[in-house]
Image (cartoon, coloured by chain):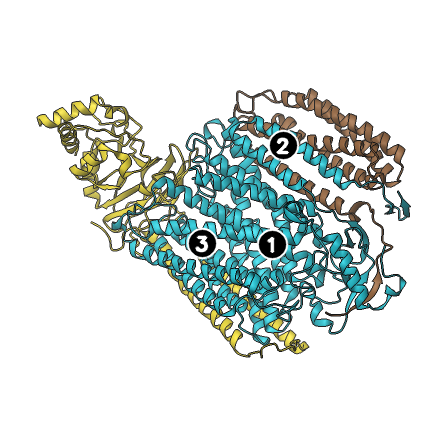
Chain colours: A yellow, B cyan, C brown
Amino acid sequence: MAVGRMHSIFDPASAEAAAVTRLWWWMFGAGLIIWLGVAALAIRAATRTRSAEGSPDIVRDTPALGRRLERVLIAGVLATAIVLAAVLVYSFAVGHALAQHDAQRLVIEVTGHRWWWEVRYTSPDPTKLVTTANEIHVPVGVPIQLRLQSDDVIHSFWAPNLNGKSDLIPGYTSALWFRADTPGTYRGQCAEYCGLAHAKMAFFVVAQPRAAFDAWLADIANPAAPPTDSVAAQGQTLFMQRGCALCHAVAGTPAGGQAAPDLTHVAARGTIAAGALVNTPENIARWIFDPSVIKPGARMPAFHLSNGDMHAVVSYLETLK
Amino acid sequence: MSSLGDEAAAGTLDARDVTREADALEHTWRDRPGLWGWLCTVDHKSIGRRYVITAFAMFLAGGIEAALMRTQLARPENAFLGADRYNQIFTTHGTTMMFLFAVPMMTAMGLYFVPLMVGARSVAFPRLNAFGYWTYLVGIGLLYVALLTNHAPDTGWFAYVPLSESLYAPGHRVDVWAQLVTFTEIAALCAAVNIIVTVFKMRAPGMSVHRIPLFVWSQLVVACMIVFAMPAVAAGSTLMLAADRAIHMQWFIPARGGDVLLWQHIFWFFGHPEVYIIFLPALGMVTPIVETFCRRPVVGYGAIVMANIATAFFAFGLWVHHMFATPLPELGDSLFTAASLVIAIPTAVQIFCWIATMWTGRPRLTVPMLFVLGFLFTFINGGITGVMLASVPFDRQAHDTFFVVAHLHYVLVGGAVMPLFAGLYFWFPKFTGRMLHNGLGKWHFWLFLIGANVAFFPMHILGLDGMPRRVYTYQASTGWGPLNFLASVGAVTLAVSVVIFLVNVLRTWRNGPIAGPNPWGAPGLEWAVASPPPPYNFVHSPVVSSAHPLWETSNALPVMTGLRTDRREVLITTTFDARPDARHSSPRGSIWPLYLALCMGVLFIGSIFRPYWVLVGIGLSLIGLFGWGWQSSRPIERERIATPNGAIVERA
Amino acid sequence: MTSLRAEDTVQDLPTVTFGQRSLMWWGTLGFMVIEGWTIALLLVSYLYLRQSAGAWPPAPAQSPSLSMPSINLGLMAISVIPAMFAARAGQRLDEPALKRWLVVLSVVATAILVLRWWDFEALRVRWDANAYSSAAWMIVGFHSSLLLLDVLDTIGLTLFLFLRRQPVKTFSDAADNSFYWYFTVGIWLPIYLITYVGPRVI
């Protein structure tokens, strides 16, 4: 379910984004009036008296005119200063309000990689640690704190409907807070140039009613069920043997790779490859066959599987709901 | 020895004497003929002219890069440019426009016009001037050979770490960037030192500080900014990033105690003043144009001087506003918000002064004036979005999106390129002795104004609608297609307008209508000499008693005689009052600046491949330094020495 | 052509001046400001790295040894004397004295440059060990390039004086050279304090 204007500040879906968008409209209004005013003055100034071509007489100020101009200039400077002061105060107030956080919040850890998002739901119980990728589910109406880190270069987490962005900086942990007020799926994209596939590093935040979220989280916490279908079982064998398990993890199986997105529940996600492709069997096959065609520079190698093998692997992945 | 004798002490000079002086000066000051003379020239006008032309060529190159980018982005999932090529091109576009066009163009205009405007024969250090230009040219060669051989840098003009460290950017692309920065930084510093010392010590007698033209004030202020800003980017790119990459230093490696944000602080400490280094000289061009075409001295001379100085100071206190999305303390951010807002005030002062000047003057809407109006409409838009971006909560939405791309192009295209075009139209007659075609100029202006707005306005909306920067493509489902297409159409319009300008220039350069010394009736000293100026600029040092010398003296221009004509002699005056103080021997043409620039090339470009080239480069440079010094020290000649304790001694 | 009216003549003005009346002095000042500011930025970066580090210097580095650097610092302090006397000889137009003091300065300056090798050794860590060592090496290294330039400049000036290439202008150049020497030595003091003494106190 999508909200009016996807990934746009013009359609805020959280308290934070709404506050910033209000600030934007006020600044836009004031800016428009100022621009029109100064433009009108400039046009009038340029056209009110015309000089004959080549007129040699130089205009000189009388002392009275000089004093009047001085007063006009001072008035202009004061007016500018007042507008700027108003912006400063309003902006600081909004920023300060956004910096107030509830002690009660859901903490989600996000680590940026080239070019995907690792998402971990923390819990005091270590057995309940949930890892997923590229799709973040949150309960509506609950303050969320994202703890942002990077595994390699600087990335930036930005879901415009929900809040401003926060950079993921190696060596630092940064935080981004928001409280989604409207259920929906909100798209975001990496907003700090991070190399070849920077343009293809999107993510989705899915805001759900609390009950639905709790159900989703409980579901995600379960390891993958073993495949019942023989084709899918063959696919699982290929998955383990062909090297997928070296980079990808599937909870409940020997696959424990940490270098690539966790695939335990990949079939439940709306997109794959960090938002680059809609999650369909055909797209999964396309991706596995040659990731660099979809995402230049993708660090996943190409797997030129035969049709049969590909069908098996895809069937297996389809069981990972 | 002066050829005039004692009669010259007072009274109008005989025209035949003046002509004889002029011929002798022409002989002494002109370049040797042929290619050798061209390579050896230290004439600030020859160097300034080739600097302007080269910088404009870089504007065109950057424009072609932009056209390639806009073609790729015109449609979603376009296959015109692949990711790697696009990344090299957007990096080269930014690097070219910021390092190879904007700053060099502004310093070039300064190096050409400041001596003329202050009544001097030359800049303070003519060979240093030549060295700066050749070093800049070596940098251009480096970047563009790299671009054509698929080695262009691809980590952005700002080269954030860790992306630009060897681990994530292997090969030599980023090293090309780092050394390019070295060359352009050396060139800018040479220009800055030259401008500062020329303005301090070589002004015409009587040109006290409150009579210095505002163009010269802006160049002086900017030269001081360059002195404090450029070392930061040089330290960052050469002493830190290049060192990390070449000899495994650990400045920015978190695992070894390095700090990723250190790069951002160092880079933006340079990067923010950089944009004012580009912007203030452009504003310095607006004043003489508005004065000339409104037939009156500018309103608020003192206010404009203070505004320049205040802007320069504040510019060094804003850099963190480029880092609002990083984890820095909230209080610190707020201070930088306040500073970023305050800097709007001095700029507003200048704008109010110009509007007041137009209001109380008699404006004539020539092509330069049209570009001034275009600048006002376009730049103010960019200034307003700049105020918006100063707000931390809003900036966190807009940072690193096309909203910022819109903002920066409105302030740079509106605030620097439009005044630059105004200046090029205004001073073209002085450069070439010809008048540009008026009709073509108007076509250029209108298409440029419309093209710029159609290209960049939609980007505000794209940014707020979620489109980040530096993306080689985007999905159709994002809905960003139509506005991107519109922006690309605007880019085409811009390109057409620039072609019209080029046609105008190429047609007029040799065949246009002749311009006299002062076709516009302007007040500055540069308009007192022929168009184009003779190699020695002024036959005798003009004496000024106002900020608008040519508007004050209707009859004879007052001058000081006495400088030698058989060797290149310039007049040194006191720093504040500009009283004549000394005579200085200015160097003749020399090959050493070019030689040393090539040595810099060997040193820095070689260092990309193997560190030992640094030693080779140093060794070769020593020869050049010796030759340069040898040329400076002349064979025994009688000099008149003023010792510190006040004695005047004649010695050989 | 506009006619020209002569107000006065400048033909009797001096052609060689000292200090801020001379362009070369201003050029030297400009160079000093640029290089000094670069060093200031490097030192600030060093301190910035310090404030986010735990132990300082971080392992495996140990605090730099102070013995050789202190000797070199002492030698630098002493070198100000021949520099001063050379400048004064130049201002007095005393060619024999200038020759003497420039030779002394050249020798002392070269000795300082040679001792610079032990200044690097005293850091007791490789430049690529960690950010601390990179910063320390780069600061000392950058200053070394200024020192090298100044030594070559001084030797070159001495050479030209002996080769009788315009000794008169050399008087003013010698004063500027000493000016630059004071800077090279003076800017070393904060470097010494922060880079060598610093790890023991900050």
Label 2 crowd bin: few (<14), some (14–19), many (20+), radius 10 Å: some
Between B599 and A116, the residue placed more toward the observer is B599
What residue did someone put label 2 on?
C142
Q: Mark 3 lies on which chain?
A: B
Q: In the image, C180: left or right of B519?
A: right
| Disc number placed over residue B439 in the picture, else none | none
Tell me if residue B287 comes above or below residue A88 in the rendering. below
Between A300 and B465, the residue placed more toward the observer is A300
Q: Residue B587, can we see it?
A: yes
Q: In the image, B134: left or right of B470?
A: right
Between A296 and A248, the residue placed more toward the observer is A296
At which x and y percent is residue C152? 72, 31
Q: Which chain carries label 1?
A: B
Q: How far apart are marks 1 and 3 (CA)?
A: 37 Å
Do callouts 1 and 3 mark residues in contact (Cβ within 8 Å)?
no
What residue is drawn where x is 69% and y is 68%?
Answer: B548
Secondary element at image label 2? helix
Q: Tell me the quarter of the picture where residue A212 sits.
A: top left
What residue did someone put label 3 on?
B389
Q: Tell me the quarter of the picture where residue C82 sits.
A: top right
Label 1 crowd bin: few (<14), some (14–19), many (20+), radius 10 Å: some
Specify the quadrant that holds the N terminus of chain B.
bottom right
Specify the quadrant that holds the C terminus of chain B.
top right
What residue did someone put label 1 on?
B49
**Type of the residue with mark 2:** Phe
Q: Mark 2 lies on which chain?
A: C
Q: Are marks 3 and 2 on the same chain?
A: no
